[in-house]
Image (cartoon, helix red, strand yellow):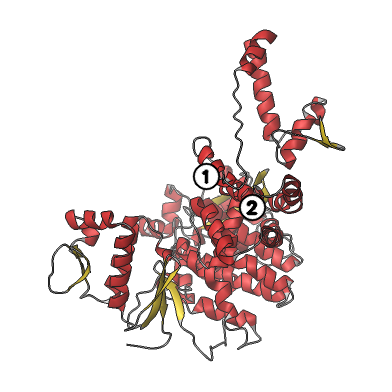
């Protein structure tokens, strides 16, 4: 029926693409939208009905048993979003994006809802589309991460988004306009379709590495670039530094899940210094190089040793794709599609010295063959690419080299050194290892920076940051977005204040700790006065006669016990000042 002129009226409104797919089902099958869930679901029920061979009367009887709930709300009294959330909790979970969409659109007039959906929300969906799926929840999480300088848990994106809107007092249209703008950057990044070919090449390489942790930095970086503040060449250089940082850490066996905080704040940290230098690349490199402990930028010596000695054969699959593609193609315009070739098994990794040594190989390697094998078997120097892995087996080096499809006839650049060898012993392995090491240092260089801050401001760290806070003076702290001043500016003052706030939030977990035996927090909390302990509440005493390192680690354990994200505690320290 018609509600307004030329506009169909739906009691239940499908989203834009689903509505199009639904209408196609009323036409010829050749027009069906195959990738739509509407089509998939229709075909499922169609096939099931045909298989069951039920009659029309039976089908009609089944349809009559369907129940539709109609809820009427009293204007000005009922909260539509709250009712929607409570009803949904009993069914299939909505995505965080579903909840956000309803939050921003539900209280608008019907006409405005449709207008905002078509003008803003649907473009956001399309900009985050990948593999016929929308990744709006993930995008909004990255958006919130750089806006708030900390990453919300994936299951709390909607809650954090609501708080962000309410605290900033943003209008619905203002936030949707901003989301559309950044979703355009998201599309450029996700599809490597920025205005610069050089930048796109870096984006493709980072995509292979699957380092989504960098996205909260790259999104505002793209905005900074496309608003005219920096050039495409500067963006490419910065992404190159990020690539080196990420890959060096992977090769050195350092976990990148500790970098959420770094990339959440890297862009905002850089803006503190833009009035001190006209070289933005130098600022970013300075910030990356200034990281310490488990977040530090691996040195040339650390990287060189790891690239030589690491088991490169048993690395994560995506890392291997990236590594061999980069080593083979380097920066050449004449490229071999290594990644696709490896993914479809057209190209495989070949052990030059085979994984099973024949008597001929043992003889060629010499009396020390077992030690050489154990040392070099899966190292990068003994690995290469081939399209004929199964035919090589554990043949002698001479056969592998001179056979019809052997190394001598290989088109891979990675085999150029092997072609020039007459034997494959430890001498050749050492030489190739040195060659690959030098290539790696060139492809993943350590960046440099001449930037030095003129005025060092106080710095803010999260409890989840890798910092031992030794010999550092504290200025203040913020717990769950509530700031706290420290009149005496002591770590003990902060320690007691945080634990007291947690107790006031919920005393039960702390009472449980006092009553039970918890290894990590044993003798940290007791129920009676004792030397070295400070009172937190009635019957709750905290051990405070300990150094900053222990205070921080006990707080981390306590936050984990409470189930509170460690990033909820932000600590402001006085930069460059020692106690």
Q: Which residue is mark 1?
A: 393
Residue drawn at (16%, 74%), measured in percent from left and top? 532
In the image, residue 408 lies at what x, y percent?
64, 56
In the image, residue 93 lies at what x, y percent?
53, 40
In the image, residue 386 lies at what x, y percent?
61, 51
Residue drawn at (27%, 77%), measured in percent from left and top? 492
Q: Secondary structure at mark 2?
A: helix
Query: In the displayed structure, would residue 72 be above or below residue 366?
Result: above
Residue drawn at (29%, 66%), measured in percent from left and top? 499
Query: In the displayed structure, would residue 451 be above or below residue 310?
Result: below
Q: Is residue 256 found left or right of 539 in the rendered image?
A: right
Q: Which residue is mark 2?
A: 104
Residue drawn at (60%, 40%), measured in percent from left and top? 73
Quarter of the image holding residue 452? bottom right
Quarter of the image holding residue 369? bottom left
**Which is nearer the eye, 3 or 514?**
3
Q: Quadrant of the N terminus?
A: top right
Q: Quadrant of the C terminus?
A: bottom left
Query: In the displayed structure, would residue 426 be above or below residue 88?
Result: below
User: Would you call the spot at circle 2 few (<14 residues within 10 Å), some (14-19), or many (20 or more)?
Assistant: many
């Amino acid at each position: 029926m018609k509600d307004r002129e030329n506009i169909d009226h739906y009691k239940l409104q499908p989203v834009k693409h689903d509505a199009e797919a639904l209408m196609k089902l009323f036409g010829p099958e050749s027009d069906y939208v195959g990738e739509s869930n509407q089509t998939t679901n229709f075909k499922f029920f169609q096939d099931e009905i045909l298989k069951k061979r039920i009659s029309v009367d039976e089908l009609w009887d089944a349809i009559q048993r369907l129940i539709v709930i109609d809820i009427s709300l009293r204007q000005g009294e009922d909260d539509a979003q709250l009712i929607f959330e409570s009803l949904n909790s009993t069914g299939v979970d909505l995505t965080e994006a579903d909840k956000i969409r309803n939050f921003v659109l539900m209280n608008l007039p019907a006409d405005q809802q449709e207008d905002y959906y078509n003008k803003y929300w649907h473009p956001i969906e399309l900009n985050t589309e990948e593999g016929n799926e929308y990744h709006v929840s993930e995008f909004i999480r990255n958006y919130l991460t750089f806006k708030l300088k900390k990453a919300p848990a994936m299951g709390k994106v909607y809650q954090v988004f609501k708080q962000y809107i309410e605290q900033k007092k943003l209008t619905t249209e203002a936030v949707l306009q901003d989301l559309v703008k950044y979703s355009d950057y998201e599309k450029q990044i996700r599809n490597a379709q920025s205005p610069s070919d050089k930048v796109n090449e870096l984006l493709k390489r980072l995509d292979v590495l699957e380092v989504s942790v960098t996205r909260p930095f790259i999104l505002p970086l793209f905005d900074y670039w496309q608003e005219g503040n920096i050039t495409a060449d500067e963006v490419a250089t910065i992404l190159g530094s990020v690539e080196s940082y990420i890959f060096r850490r992977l090769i050195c066996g350092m976990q990148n899940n500790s970098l959420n905080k770094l990339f959440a704040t890297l862009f905002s940290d850089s803006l503190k210094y833009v009035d001190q230098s006209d070289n933005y690349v130098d600022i970013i490199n300075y910030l990356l190089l200034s990281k310490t402990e488990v977040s530090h930028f691996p040195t040339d010596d650390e990287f060189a040793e790891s690239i030589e000695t690491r088991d490169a054969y048993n690395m994560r699959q995506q890392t291997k794709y990236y590594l061999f593609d980069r080593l083979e193609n380097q920066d050449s315009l004449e490229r071999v599609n290594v990644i696709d070739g490896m993914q479809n098994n057209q190209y495989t990794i070949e052990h030059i010295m085979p994984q099973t040594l024949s008597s001929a190989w043992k003889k060629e390697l010499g009396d020390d063959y077992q030690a050489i094998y154990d040392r070099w078997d899966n190292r990068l120097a003994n690995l290469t690419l081939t399209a004929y892995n199964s035919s090589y087996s554990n043949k002698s080096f001479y056969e592998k080299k001179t056979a019809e499809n052997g190394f001598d006839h290989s088109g891979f650049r990675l085999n150029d050194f092997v072609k020039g060898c007459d034997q494959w012993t430890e001498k050749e392995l050492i030489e190739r290892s040195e060659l690959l090491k030098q290539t790696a240092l060139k492809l993943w260089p350590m960046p440099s920076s001449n930037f030095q801050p003129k005025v060092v401001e106080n710095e803010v760290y999260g409890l989840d940051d890798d910092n031992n806070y030794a010999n550092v003076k504290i200025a203040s702290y913020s717990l769950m977005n509530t700031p706290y001043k420290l009149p005496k500016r002591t770590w003990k003052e902060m320690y007691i204040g945080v634990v007291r706030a947690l107790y006031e939030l919920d005393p039960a977990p702390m009472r449980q700790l006092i009553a039970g035996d918890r290894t990590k927090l044993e003798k940290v909390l007791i129920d009676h006065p004792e030397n070295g302990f400070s009172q937190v509440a009635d019957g709750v005493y905290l051990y405070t006669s300990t150094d900053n390192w222990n205070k921080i680690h006990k707080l981390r354990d306590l936050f984990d016990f409470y189930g509170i994200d460690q990033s909820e505690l932000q600590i402001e320290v006085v930069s460059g000042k020692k106690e």
